[in-house]
């Protein structure tokens, strides 16, 4: 794989054989971000579970203390008074069947998060095949199927993120922007890792957190020690 000069220079700051403590890792991820734009910092946590088993799923949501640095577009499926409530709360789009048709017929995905009131899930269920693979299907566990649309929209706009396992038992999540600085990134990191640990399934055996890596959009990966957690 071709790597540019900036990436190679950034890589020289990092020892790949070392698991850095969290504070040092956050300092490094900020220093090693080579791009001219404000890069997103992501965390990748490999867990000692098997996502093929229902009793070993790890999924949830958390409002990061310092947000994500990104404004997320929210679509709400609701009707009547809840529709007005969603728009008043700051939802970018709100509606019912007309939005289902727009998504299916126009392949429209100009949104980052989908929220639905429980009475709309019969309609939203029709979108399972298109929303599911994109990780956009609303779920009670993530707090995106709820009668309280005002709270849901406010939390998402404030920096609520969803974490869930992929097929390789890894959680990938943004924890902020390089411009946040090391301290705020660490606060977000601590909050997310704490939530993942609390979500440990009873069926999980052996070492729960197998590895943890952070990286900025264009920067190299940095191994983080999670021993203290």
Image: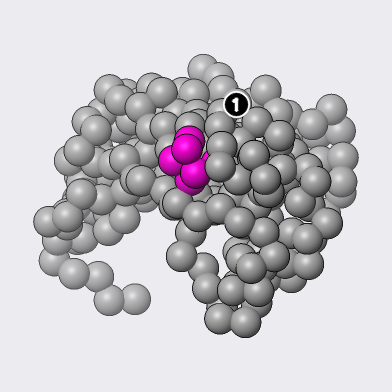
The region drawn magenta spans 86-91
Task: Identify the image's colour scheme: rainbow, by chain, secondary structure or one colour.
Answer: one colour
Q: In this rendering, is residue 183 above or below 104?
A: above
Q: Position of residue 87 (x, y in %)?
A: 49, 44
Q: Residue furthest top?
A: 228
Is residue 86 something that shows in the picture? Answer: yes
Q: In this rendering, is residue 216 above or below 81?
A: below
Q: Report whether 124 appears left or right of 159.
A: right
Q: Position of residue 16 (x, y in %)?
A: 36, 47
Q: In this rendering, is residue 186 above or below 9?
A: above
For the point 22% across and 31% down, the residue is 181
Q: Quadrant of residue 14?
A: top left
For the point 74% across and 39% down, the residue is 140
Q: Quadrant of residue 70?
A: top left
Front-lying residue, 204 or 78: 78
Is residue 45 something that shows in the picture? Answer: no
Q: Position of residue 55 (x, y in %)?
A: 87, 40
Front-lying residue, 107 or 83: 83
For the point 65% across and 74% down, the residue is 101
Front-lying residue, 14 or 126: 126
**According to the image, label 1 marks what residue?**
195
Decide whether residue 213 is among the magenta residues. Answer: no
Q: Report whether 173 appears left or right of 183.
A: right
Image quadrant containing the N terminus: bottom left
Number of residues whose C-alpha sits closer than 10 Å to that of mark 1, classed few (under 14), some (14–19) or many (20 or more) = some
Q: In this rendering, is residue 186 above or below 129?
A: above
SS type, badge 1:
helix
For the point 46% across and 65% down, the residue is 110
Q: Residue furthest bottom?
A: 105
Q: Position of residue 18 (x, y in %)?
A: 38, 37
Q: Does the magenta stretch mainly form a helix, a strand or a loop?
A: helix
């Amino acid at each position: 794989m071709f790597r540019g000069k900036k990436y190679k220079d950034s890589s020289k700051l990092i020892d790949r054989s070392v698991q850095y403590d969290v504070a040092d890792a956050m300092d490094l991820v900020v220093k090693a971000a080579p791009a001219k734009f404000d890069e997103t910092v992501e965390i990748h946590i490999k867990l000692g579970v098997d996502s093929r088993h229902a009793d070993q799923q790890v999924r949830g949501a958390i409002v990061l203390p310092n947000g994500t640095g990104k404004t997320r577009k929210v679509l709400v499926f609701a009707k009547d008074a809840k529709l007005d409530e969603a728009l008043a709360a700051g939802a970018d789009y709100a509606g019912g069947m007309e939005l289902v048709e727009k998504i299916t017929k126009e392949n429209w995905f100009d949104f980052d998060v989908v929220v639905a009131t429980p009475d709309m899930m019969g309609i939203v269920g029709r979108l399972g095949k298109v929303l599911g693979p994109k990780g956009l299907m609303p779920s009670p566990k993530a707090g995106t199927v709820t009668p309280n649309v005002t709270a849901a929209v406010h939390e998402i706009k404030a920096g609520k993120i969803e974490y869930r396992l992929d097929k390789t038992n890894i959680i990938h999540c943004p924890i902020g922007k390089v411009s946040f600085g090391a301290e705020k990134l660490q606060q977000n990191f601590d909050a997310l890792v704490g939530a993942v640990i609390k979500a440990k399934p009873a069926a999980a055996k052996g070492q729960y957190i197998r590895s943890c890596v952070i990286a900025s959009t264009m920067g190299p990966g940095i191994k983080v020690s999670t021993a203290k957690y």
